[in-house]
Amino acid sequence: MPRAYAVRVGSTGQLDLPRIAWEGGPGFYNQFSTMAGTEWTSDSFFPIAYWGPYVNTQSWIEHDAELGINCMMNAYNVGASSASWLRSNGIWNCSGTMPGAGSEWIGITVDDEIDLWAGSGWDPWTGNTGFVPNVCVPDDPRHCGFTATSGLWGNYLPLTDGRMRFMNWGKQCMMFASTTQSRTFVNGTRSPDALADWDFHMQTADVYFYSDTNIASEAPNFLSIPSGQVRRAYNYGTLMDRLRELSMLDAASPHCPFGVIVELAGQGNGLNVYGQNVAGAVWATLIREARMVLYFSHGFANTTDNPGNGIPDILNQTGGVYEDTQDIVGALNAEVQGFAPILNTQSYQWTFGSNLNTMLKAKDGFAYIFAMAARESTHSTAARTFTLPAAVHGTTVEVVGEARSLGVSGGSFTDSFANEYTHHVYKVAI
């Protein structure tokens, strides 16, 4: 269970409730010299990252910025002007060194899915990375993921450049490995050996519930998700739960911020992803305490709605559903950024009712309830009841951004969710 911090109601509008374990916000980023004094340390900033972007086209970077992308991770096709284009468009380089890198370079993406391409274990590592031959010794089955993680972490020591180190995990850490093995990926060994005690500053994970060909059979076996409930936004939040739980096996609070990468298009076998799916998945991660929004840039489906197997950059793909997705992503990013002063506060523990997935925060005399429907066997549009904490005295609930309000009766209110990906944000006076 998260560590609880009792906080009394005061002039700042806080609540007398236990707190969710907290490791994020501007205070966390201020410890890095390349981020100190930048917008990262402002309550009004929330990181919105693009994973795997192509940064060799100026117009694409400009369009990314227009859509609200403010961080690039694991960049492809880096060119001589990439750094200056990022800098001039206010996008932070969280990927790594580039020609002409300057003040925009605040982070390094150490690697992607070491757990999946190298497996769990301390077998010898050849130095090869990715899904290529001859990675481990022996190479089949592969059990050198810990050795590879140690080696790659060592490439970026000592930590004297003031930059964050990012790491992304895949299905091995999130699903296939034992808890002990996954714990090692996330936390290192917590030993005196600096190479074995890796300590990534932000960690993310990717499991594509909407569009992965194999996930429908894997999720029931490894994550205990019923087979008919796999392709739902709620499940992206379960990855956040797992990351934080693994981290807290070695401490009372998560030792770094976490996030989950959400795919923008189908990844195989004719599976589609639409903008509303993306929005639902993103909010599911935020409600489960994600500290960053992340989008995966590539598409590998080839259907009428998600055409073109091998699309490198969905946010810059013209035509059809992809432009609709871009519109939704742009609006979603603006919405998230607008809530940044709220998202950058520590959440409270509170159960509002059954069949709900919620996060409770408070600021300036108001409680904010971020909510979606919980994962259910069959999604229902029936009204759901929210029971408010005793310290929340407002008689009217504003549904933020929806031009409607709800009445409070007997300390509770009701509302419904049209789809499994629908989210609402409620604001009520304390």
Image: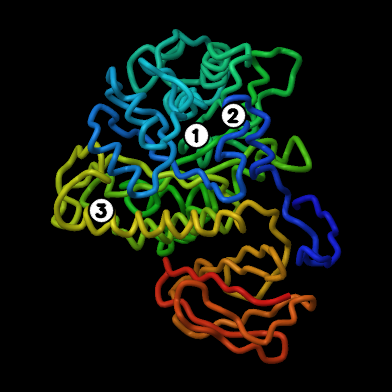
Picture coordinates of residue 285, whole percent (x, y): 52, 53
Q: Is residue 72 left or right of residue 80?
A: right
- The residue lying at 41 percent from left, 36 percent from top is 91
Q: Residue beneath label 1, please?
A: 169
Element at label 1: strand
Looking at the image, do the residues carrying marks 2 and 1 touch, with CB atoms under 8 Å apart?
Answer: yes
Label 3 to label 1: alpha-carbon separation: 23 Å
Indicate whether 130 appears above or below 167.
above
Q: Nearer the viewer, residue 134 or 303?
A: 303
Picture coordinates of residue 292, whole percent (x, y): 52, 45
**Position of the C terminus by quadrant:** bottom right
Mark 2 or mark 3, which is nearer the start of the sequence? 2
Mark 1 or mark 2, which is nearer the start of the sequence? 1
Q: Nearer the viewer, residue 110 or 102?
A: 102
- The residue lying at 52 percent from left, 85 percent from top is 383
Looking at the image, do the residues carrying marks 3 and 1 touch, with CB atoms under 8 Å apart?
Answer: no
Report the disc number at residue 271: 3
Indicate whether 351 appears above or below 67.
below
Q: Residue beneath label 2, please?
A: 185
* Residue 1 makes an appearance in the image: yes
Element at label 3: loop
Q: Amino acid at mark 1?
A: Trp
Label 2 to label 1: alpha-carbon separation: 8 Å
Picture coordinates of residue 14, whole percent (x, y): 77, 64
Element at label 2: helix
Q: Is residue 404 left or right of residue 254?
A: left
- The residue lying at 67 percent from left, 54 percent from top is 345
Report the disc number at residue 90: none
Q: Residues within 10 Å of mark 2 (few under 14, many from 20)?
A: many
